[in-house]
Image (spheres, helix red, strand yellow):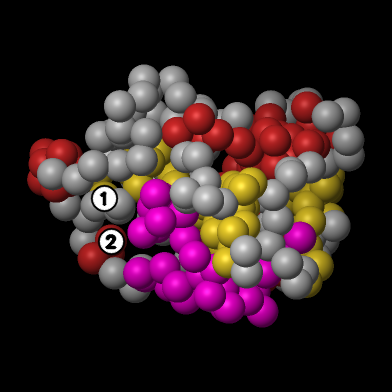
Amino acid sequence: MLLLSIFACTIQSSLADPPDAPTAKQALSNQRFPGEDKPSGTTVFDAFPPPVGATRVTPDRFGVRLQQLKLRGPLEPVRTHDGRAVAHRARVIELPLVKGDLQQCADSALRLRAEYLRDEGLEVVFHATSGDPMPWARYRDGERAYAVGNSLKWKSADPASWDRYLTDLFMWAGTASLAERDTVPDRHPDPGDVMVQPGFPGHAILLLDVATKGEQTFVLVGEGYMPAQDFHIELGDHDGWWLWQDGVQLGHWDMPASSLRTWK
């Protein structure tokens, strides 16, 4: 059976039983966040300047795009695909969800990379867990992938919407394919890099920004999670940034330096 990305992340914290919306909102209202005094339409770049004394690493075009992502209001809770609030310490990024419990950790990174490639006029192709390529062009031109046993086959269909392509990609891709097929190992964190622990379950985060101060490196972490929920900045202790300490030790998942990867 073709493995689905819905098993790509797991719950290792209180997120396994999300509180109802008022409870999460009340908890968030007792915290102050970087960028709290800025309007809800602020960008990642504006809301999260580097820690004092640190300087941003020069990003590539993908990194610049990530810096310009729009944020929701600082007290907006992270919500699951079915509207429940979950108690992250986070700022929510304006990134639509596809319908259902599909757009999880690796999928959020895949979506941002795919939409960057599409908007740049570059080829959009990622891989299913089976290793089969999934090019957007085949969906756009009137084909559709379907699972047969442990692989994908193709059939004629009406030209598909972008969301239809993403829905299928999220069903059949995940942390394993992201690590094995669509990225390569990296040694130094840069904006746009991903950190991937492949598996069933596994986890992936996206580095939205990187800054340095002497020998110290700080990273701004973008994260999706399971069940499918808003992509968000998981706030670290350094003005929202995380200190790179042979990787990133989130409260719910350790991402070692060996998990750092960059896009092919």
- Which residue position is annotated with label 1? 86
Q: Tell me: residue 111, above or below residue 53.
A: above
Q: Tell me: residue 153, above or below residue 82.
A: below
Q: Secondary structure at mark 1?
A: strand
The crowding category of the residue bearing disc 1, from other C-alpha atoms within 10 Å (few below 14, some 14 to 19, many at least 20), is many
Please name the amino acid that badge 2 sits on: Leu
Q: Residue at x 56, y 52 (%)?
A: 54
Asked where in the image residue 246 lies, by quadrant, the reply is: bottom right
Asked where in the image residue 253 lies, by quadrant, the reply is: bottom left
Q: Is residue 153 visible?
A: no
Figure quadrant of the N terminus: bottom right
Q: Which residues are magenta?
A: 234-262
Residue 93 is inside the magenta segment:
no
Q: Residue at x 66, y 79 (%)?
A: 258
Give the alpha-carbon distance from disc 2 to disc 1, as whole Å: 6 Å
- Which residue position is annotated with label 2? 15
Please name the amino acid that badge 1 sits on: Val
Q: Give percent across and percent down for residue 251.
A: 35, 69
